[in-house]
Image: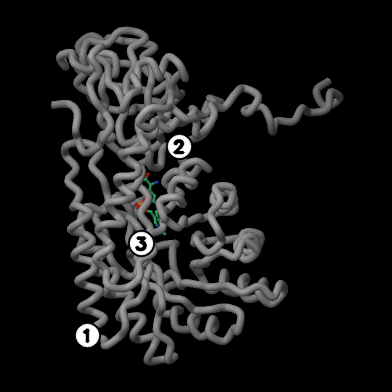
Amino acid sequence: MRISQSWQPISLRYGDNGHLWLANTDLHALAQDKGTPLYVLDLATLMARCQAYQQCFNAYPGKVQLVYASKALSCVGVLQLMHKLGFAVDVVSGGELLTAFKAGLPGEKIVFHGNNKSRAELLDALMAGTGRIVIDSLDELTRLESLVHDTGLPAEVLLRVVPGIEAHTHEHIKTGQRDTKFGIPSEQVLEAVRRVLKQPRIRFCGLHAHVGSQIFDAEPLAQCAEVLLDLAAHIETQTGTWIDDLNIGGGLGIAYTDSDHPVALEQVAERLIISIQNKCSQLKKPLPRLMLEPGRSLVATAGLTLYSVGTLKEILGVRSIAAVDGGMADNPRPITYGAKYTVDCVNKATEDLTHKYRVVGKFCESGDILLKEAQLPKLDIGDVLVVYATGAYNYSMASNYNRVPRPAMVLVTADQVLDLVARETAEDLLRHDQHLPPDLLK
Ligand code: LLP
């Protein structure tokens, strides 16, 4: 069975013509119509993932605010959907903030993150009436204090702390350990709280931590909640202030291939809720509002990328290579993290997987390999390949390396295809280039 895998969108099916379809859209025809590479998002999967989070965390007896970490995939249409589905949105830059704003999110549904927010970004956040600004360092707090003083605008803040928890994931996406660029080091937390409490226009709302990304186990998240609650209790004994919000970040992993086995969301929710309830009753404290910031686990499996095969190369006695029209610029995860993906041939979906290929991109770098080894039907030039689970950290991390325009993105609903992002053009690539004066070139 090559469909109904957890890394595939739920609307994926075989069509009568032997192609892969997404709901009522033939993916091969879509590739012909819109061109490749093409990012495709399945609305049904996106909605199902959002609803699963909502259902699982409904069991928490206190208040819950689910926050979509928009760094995973940020564009106006996706944020409009998240807003409609009741999610708040986490942003980490002026650009992500602007996108959330354009998508119609009210300020109070925005959480502003980042380990080095500029004065200009903090000012944007204050002007937007951002619901929560997550302070990441004492220097940032100094900038905020001065801005609040100069503008008279109020701020509601969480302090990002370092829980000292090791999550078993890639070095580049771990954040919970003590040696990290994120968060206020533990020895400075009390000073930060005291400074916030001194400011009449800055409200201390609670604590935040994020232990890392692509985590397969409920344990680090539950431990993180417990560490934060212990810290909150310590803060209360020192300052008399208890927290309103407990924000334990995102990080739940997904399966990209059949060797990935992430814990089910239901189990994470159950484990977390029990830990928080137990800890609060042990501390004799009221339950805080629980905030979670999933990114990848909401959008990754809703997304897929379509590519056309342009070159087939046989290196005798070594391997067969299939080169597609995209690669590391639209999906930098394999070269950055050694990430693995799963691939199929859209227009030969029911043919036997008789051939082994290395699927490579078109960019000038030997490491531009999308899949080191893929079992596929015999390929021909013009075949369309689909790489699954590309909804998170693909478009958002895409570049113009080799001056290749970034792909378009579409949303597939039960009966329509809607444009989310237009394909970049040659003019887009040249838009910011300036010509030097002729006399310099004489
Ligand atoms: N909250 C905070 C404060 C974060 O830093 C992140 C991710 C999230 C939430 C969402 O985490 P998620 O649920 O998506 O794991 N580019 C890497 C992932 C970097 C994650 C950065 N922070 C990748 O492609 O794997």
Name which of mark 3 and mark 1 comes first in the sequence. 1
Q: Quadrant of residue 274?
A: bottom left
Q: Quadrant of the N terminus?
A: top left
Tell me the CA gap for discs 1 and 2: 44 Å
Q: Toward the viewer: 37 or 33? A: 33
Q: Do the CB atoms of the residues marked 1 and 2 lie less than 8 Å apart?
A: no
Q: In which quarter of the image is the C terminus?
A: top right
Element marked by disc 1: helix
Residue 282's label in the rendered image is: 1
Residue occupying image coordinates x 23% and y 76%: 277
Q: Toward the viewer: 140 or 32? A: 32
In the rendered image, residue 171, in percent from the top left (x then y), is placed at 32, 52
Give the label, 3 or 2, closer to the camera.
3
- Is disc 2 surrounded by few (<14), some (14 to 19) or many (20+) residues within 10 Å? many
Give the residue number, with chain letter if any, for mark 2.
395
Q: Can residue 158 be seen in this view?
A: yes
What is the three-letter code of the residue carrying label 1?
Gln
Q: Residue furthest toward the left?
A: 1
Residue 292's label in the rendered image is: 3
Element marked by disc 3: strand
